[in-house]
Each structure stands twice: as structure tokens, then as C-alpha cells.
């Protein structure tokens, strides 16, 4: 998959309280919290978008078919707001099987980070693309939610490790080039996810005296 976001792609932002956006940055709004949670789960389980798996993950009890259908309907409605010309069924077609059929391309910010990190490692000239997506990180994964399944299946841990790896890689590259501004912004992105990360704090501390001196000379 290309790291570029297509005009019909829906981006699910996982770092911070989850947001669902189109390529212009318009945010989908959901009336039911479970609708947002279900869409987040689907964005992370595109290889097995099954109703039974989603119900098991999101509910600790046997949820009724009517309740689940209501959640899916609200999810469709919220997505339709991102593209008013579309029908609500254009996003997730109704089926009579266990499968949840997705007719739109969902991509998470984590996928974008992973793709652009791989590209950067092959071609450091692509650093800006990696930086752009790193700088959209707002907080730890799923901040402000109670998505217990994300902790139980290791998703939160995997997303945290990815953000730290990408931030550290870009920060170290920037440090080697003497770019203190980029290095500090990269470490700041990672520290939003894991504030006590020693690796990132060490990189940050190595630049703070130089940044302080530079500011003193500029304004002194």
C-alpha cells in the first residue's frame, strides 16, 4: 500500500483519543461510542472483519443482534458525513453472513508511520514524510478510552513500540545531521506516547544545552 493518502481513504487516528477523518481532515462524528470503537477495531482487524470476533472483543456479554445492528448503522451514518454524496451502505454493505464487508479503504495513522518508516530507512531523503505523520501524534494510543481488548491483545503495546521506534530513528538521524529542531520535535512526538522513555529523553537532553545557548545568543 502506498504511504500517500488517497482522496477516498478514511484515516483512523489511534494515537490519542481515536479520530476518524477523510483526506481533508474532516472528522466523522458518532452518536454511539461503540460505533467509534467498532470502527477502530475494524481498522486493526481488516484481515478478519467478522461480526462474531467484533462482538467478542467489544462486549463482555452476549450482545443482541438488534444492538449490534444499531451500532453498525451509526458507524455507517458517521462515515457518510465524510462524503455526503455517498449512501450509508456504500461504506459497509449489508450482508447475511458473519463477514463485515468494507467497501472503503481504511488506514490507521500507525500504518502510515510504519510505511513511512520503512521508506525512510531505504531513502533518508523521505524524512519529511515520516516527520509529517509523526507530528500528528497527540497522546498515547487510545488515550481517554476504555478499550480493554486493545490491552488484552497487545495492540496498545505494539503501537507504543512503533511510535518510539519511529521517533527514535528520525531523532537520531536528525542528531547526526546537527538538526536540533527536527531531533527535538521527533523526540517530543515519541514522548507523548511514552513520557518516561529513557532513549528519547537521552537524545532530547543532548540537544537542550545547545538549544538554550542558541536562544541566549539570539535574544541576548
Image: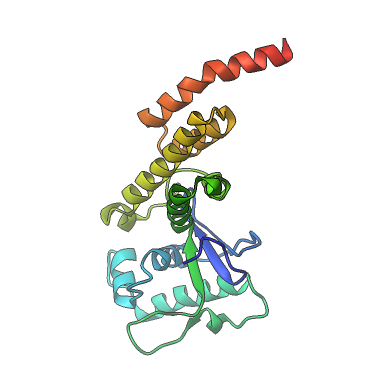
Farthest residue, direction right: 219
Q: Position of residue 196 (x, y in %)?
A: 38, 30
Q: How is the image coloured?
A: rainbow
Q: Nearer the viewer, residue 40 or 8?
A: 8
Farthest residue, direction bottom: 96
Indicate the quadrant where residue 211 lies.
top right
Q: Position of residue 214 (x, y in %)?
A: 64, 17
Residue 91 is at least partly visible in this image: yes
Residue 196 is at least partly visible in this image: no
Is residue 70 shown left or right of residue 136?
Answer: left
Is residue 102 shown left or right of residue 198?
Answer: right
Q: Position of residue 131 (x, y in %)?
A: 55, 45
Does residue 195 sit above or below 165 in this rendering?
above
Q: Nearer the viewer, residue 1 or 96?
A: 1
Q: At 60% from the left edge and 75% from the top edge, which residue is drawn?
A: 80
Q: At 42% from the left edge and 48% from the top edge, which residue is drawn?
A: 141
Q: Nearer the viewer, residue 130 or 12?
A: 130
Q: At 33% from the left edge and 70% from the top edge, which residue is drawn?
A: 54
Is residue 107 shown left or right of residue 179?
Answer: left
Q: At 66% from the left edge and 62% from the top edge, which residue is drawn?
A: 24
Farthest residue, direction top: 220
Q: Position of residue 127 (x, y in %)?
A: 54, 45
Amino acid at each position: 500500500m502506498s504511504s500517500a493518502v488517497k482522496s477516498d481513504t478514511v484515516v483512523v487516528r489511534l494515537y490519542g483519543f481515536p479520530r476518524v477523518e477523510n483526506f481533508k481532515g474532516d472528522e466523522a462524528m458518532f452518536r454511539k461510542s461503540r460505533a467509534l470503537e467498532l470502527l477502530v477495531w475494524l481498522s486493526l482487524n481488516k484481515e478478519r472483519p467478522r461480526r462474531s470476533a467484533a462482538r467478542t472483543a467489544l462486549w463482555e456479554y452476549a450482545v443482541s443482534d438488534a444492538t449490534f445492528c444499531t451500532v453498525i448503522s451509526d458507524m455507517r451514518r458517521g462515515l457518510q458525513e465524510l462524503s455526503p454524496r455517498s449512501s450509508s451502505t456504500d461504506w459497509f454493505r449489508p450482508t447475511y453472513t458473519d463477514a463485515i464487508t468494507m467497501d472503503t479503504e481504511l488506514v490507521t495513522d500507525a500504518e502510515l508511520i510504519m510505511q513511512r518508516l520503512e521508506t525512510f530507512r531505504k531513502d533518508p531523503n523521505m524524512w519529511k514524510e515520516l516527520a509529517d505523520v509523526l507530528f500528528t501524534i497527540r497522546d498515547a494510543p487510545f488515550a481517554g478510552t476504555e478499550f480493554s481488548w486493545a490491552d488484552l491483545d497487545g495492540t496498545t503495546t505494539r503501537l507504543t513500540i512503533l511510535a518510539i521506534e519511529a521517533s527514535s530513528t528520525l531523532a537520531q538521524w536528525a542528531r547526526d545531521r546537527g538538526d536540533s529542531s527536527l531531533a527535538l520535535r521527533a523526540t517530543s512526538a515519541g514522548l507523548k506516547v511514552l513520557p518516561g522513555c529513557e532513549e528519547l529523553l537521552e537524545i532530547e537532553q543532548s540537544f537542550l544545552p545547545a538549544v538554550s545557548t542558541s536562544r541566549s545568543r539570539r535574544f541576548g
